Image (tube, grey):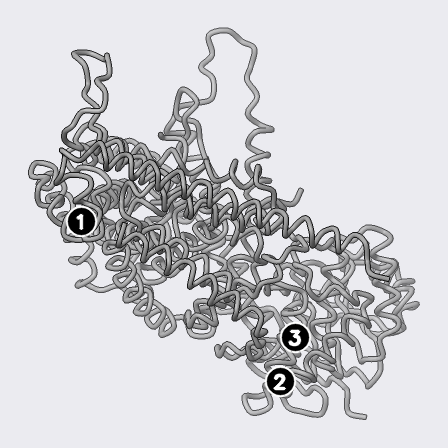
Amino acid sequence: MLSKPAEMHIPDGFLSVGVSIALWIVALIFIAISLRKVNQTLGERQVPLMGVLAACIFAGQMLNFTVAGGTSGHLMGAALATILIGPWASILVMTCVVGAQALLFQDGGLLALGGNIVNMGIIGSFVSYGIFTVIKRLAGERRVGVFLSGFTAGWTSIVVAALAVALQLAASGTTTANIAVPTMGVVHMLIGIGEGLITVGALSVVYAARRDLVTGDAPAKGGNRGLVIGGVLIAVLLAVASPLASAFPDGLEWVAEQQGFLDKAQGPAFELFPDYVVPGIQNEALATIAAGLLGMLIVLGAASALAWSRRKRATPSV
Amino acid sequence: MHLHYLDPYQPRDSVVHALDARIKLSLAVAFILVVALMPMGAWALYALLLALSLSVIVLSELGVGPVLKRSVLALPFVLAAAPLLITGGLPTLVTLPIGGGIPISAPGAARFASIAIKSWLSLQMAIVLASATSFPQLLLAMRALRVPKLFVATFGLMWRYLFVLADETQRMLRARAARSGVSGEPGRKVGGSVIWRARVAGAMAGSLFLRAIERGDRIYLAMASRGYDGEIRSFPMPVIPRAQWVVLFAAFFVLALLLGLSLVF
Amino acid sequence: MHHRIEIEDAAFAYPDGQEALRGVSLKIEAGEKVALVGQNGAGKSTLMLHLNGILRPRSGSIQVAGMDVNDKTLSRVRAAVGLVFQMPDDQLFSPTVFDDVAFGPIYQGLTEAEVRKRVDAALADVGMGGFGPRVSHHLSIGQKKRVAIACVLAMQPEILVLDEPTAGLDPRSRRGLIHLLDALPQTMLVSTHDLPMVRELFRRTVVMDNGLIVADGATADILGDTALLHRYGLE
C-alpha cells in the first residue's frame, strides 16, 4: 500500500454522485479564486510559470526512495509547492497535476476529480500553508526552523488529506468511518514521514540557493493571517472530526443514506420483502441473462461493423 | 532517452478517433455519470453498460485486451470498500474460517462488487478517452466546455514541459543509480539511512524546482518576444459535423434509456 | 531599407548589480550578417535581449528597423526582430508545432487564413513542411531548432537574432542549419562559439568581452589574429 501515491487518488465509482458534485463545486470556487489571485501577483508570467511548475511537481512525483522491504516513499508536492510559491499558486499547480493524472493517466476518476482536487490541491495547500507559517513563527527563520516547519507541513498535509478521503468515502457509503478513518490515518501517518523528509530535502537545496523563496512572509505569495488560521483550522477540524466520525459512524451513514435515493428505488426487491427472495432472484437472474445476451449482441454488432468497414478500407472501390 | 510512453494517445484510424474531442469528452463524462447513478446490485444494467463500453473499445481499435489490462490497474483501490464486506448487515453470505470465523455480509458483498464493477466500467471509458484523443484536441474540448482560458493555457504548457522535466528527472534518477554501487567490504552498512535517502530524493526535487523556475522565466521571455501580453488568444472553434451531432444525441439517448431502466427496475 | 540595428553606448546592469553591458555601440546595416563571439558571460545574450525590447538599457539608445525601442514601439519592434533562443525547448512552449509557429502571427492579429498561410510558408522555409500537427517533444534537437526559427520567420521579421544556433547539433544537422542561415535574406546577428561556422558564413565578426565590444571587423582579420583570440578566450 505504501508503494504508490495513487493511494490518495479516488477513482470513479467510490464517491456517490451527491458527494462528487458537492466537492466539484468547492473545487471550482477555489480554482476560480486562485486563478484571479495568482493573476494579480504574476500577471503575464502566470501561464508560463504555473505551467512549468505543475510539470515540475508532476515530474517530482516520479522521484522515489526505498524505505524498506520493497516499498518506497514518494512526493505529493502540495506542501513543497505551497512553501515555495504560496497557497493560491499551489492550488493552481496541484489542480493541473491532479487533473492531468485523471485525464491522461486515469490516476483518479473524472467525476471524482473534484474531490481529488479538494483533497490534494486545496486541503493540502491550505493546511501546509497554515502549519508551515505557524511553526516557522515559533521555531524561527533559521535553517532548523525552516526545515522543521517544512517537515511538519509535509506530514500534516498528507495525513489530513487522507482523513478527508476517508470521510468522503464514508459519506458516500463506500466504506464505514470506524474502519476507514483509522486505517487511512495510520497508513498515511507513515507515508507522511516520506513526504516530510523529501520536502525538507528539497527545502535544503532551495535554502542554499534561493533563501528568499523560503524565508520571510513573502506577501507576494498571496498569503495572509486569515489563510493561516483557515489552514490550521482545516487541519484541526479534520483531525477532530475524523475520530468523532469513526466513533459515531451513524452520522456519515445517515449522510450516505440520504443521497442513496436511487438505491431506495431498488430497495424493495432487495430488503423489504425477504419472503419473495426466491422469485425475486429468478426475475433478477432472468433479467441479467437477458441483458447479458443483449450485451453480447451489441458487442458482436460493433465488431462486425468494424470488420466490415475494415474490409471496405482494405479493398478500395475501383 | 525520451519518455514517449508518458503520452497515452495512440493514433489509430478508427471512428472513435475521428469523433470530435468535444463530443468524446462529453460522452465519456456522461457515461461515467450514468454509471455512478446506477443503483447498487443492478447486475443486468451493468452487463449492458459493459457491452456499451466493450463496443466502444472494439470500435476504437485500441485492442480489447490492452484496454482491459490497463483498466484493472486502479482496482486495488477497491480495498477501501472492503469494510463493507463485514459491516454490510444480514443475511450472511458465507463465514470465512479465519480466527473465530468472519461473517461476510451478503448485501455488503453485493455493494462491494457493485462498487468494483462501477469503478472498472468508468475506468474503461476514461482509458478510451485518453488513448483515442490527442492532447491538443483535449485542450480544445476543455476550452469548448468553458474551462477558463488561463487555466487551459497553463494546462497545455504543463503538458509540454511534463516530458522535458520527466526526462530531466529520469536523468537524475539514472545518475543516482549509477553512483549507488555497493562496496564489497563486509560489515559495511549499505545505502545509508532512510532519512538520508529521502533527503537525496528531496534534493533532486529541490533542484528540479529551481531549474523549473528559471525555465519559467525563459519561457516567458520567449512568449513575450513573440508578442504575448497576458491575454490568451486562439482560433475560433471548428464546426462539429452534423453526423457527429447525431452520434452525440443517439448516445445520450441510449444512456438516458439505461438510466430510466434503472429507475423502474 | 531601414532593416538596420543601431546601438549607441548602451549600458545595462541586472537587479543583482551585475554589470552586463558597459557602453556598447554597434551598427549593422540592412542585409548584413554579423557573428557575435565571446566567452560565456561576456554579455552576448544580454545584448540580444535588448534588440527585442525584453531588456531596456539603463543608458544609451537602441534603434532597430528604424524605430527607437520604447513602450510605444514595443509590439512593432517585436514583430520586426525575430529572436531565436539558445534552447529550443524554452521557445517551443505549445503542445504542437503548428500552435507554436502560429503563436506570433496570432498575436499580430492576423486572420485564421493568414496565420495558416504564414505557418505553412515558415515551416516550408526551414524544411519542416508537414510537421504542423506533430508534438514538439518528439522532434530531434536539430528539428526543434528549425521549428524555433520557423516560429520567428512566421512573424515575417526584418531582422533575425539567433543565440547559439548550432549548439548541441550533430554534424549533419549543423550543416543543414548553416545552409538554412545562408539562404535566409534577413539582416542577421548570430551569437555563437562555432568559429568554423563564423568563418564560413559571416563576413563581419564582433567580439565581446566583459560587457564591452572589444573587436569589430572582417571575419578573416579577427579569426586570423591568434593573439586576440587567445586574449578573449576564444581558442
- Where's residue B229, x and y in %? 51, 79
The alpha-carbon separation of the residues under discs 1 and 3 comes to 55 Å
User: Identity of the amino acid at label 2?
Assistant: Gln
Q: Please, is residue B242 above or below residue C73 in the view?
A: above
User: Which part of the image, by quadrant, shows the N terminus of chain B?
Assistant: top right
Q: Give whichever of B94, B226 is nearer the camera.
A: B94
- Indicate which label's residue lies in the foreground, 1 or 3: 1
Q: Which residue is mark 2?
A: C108
Residue shown at the point (45%, 47%) measured from the top left: A106
Q: Is C220 left or right of A82, judged from the image as shown?
A: right
Q: Please, is residue C134 above or below residue A255 in the view?
A: below
**Residue C109, quarter of the rendered image:** bottom right
Q: Which residue is mark 1?
A: A264
Mark 3 element type: helix
The alpha-carbon separation of the residues under discs 2 and 3 comes to 10 Å
Residue shown at the point (29%, 35%) measured from the top left: A282
Q: Give whichever of A83, B76 is nearer the camera.
A: B76
- Where's residue A67, x and y in %? 39, 26
User: Identity of the amino acid at label 1?
Assistant: Lys
User: Identity of the amino acid at label 3?
Assistant: Ala
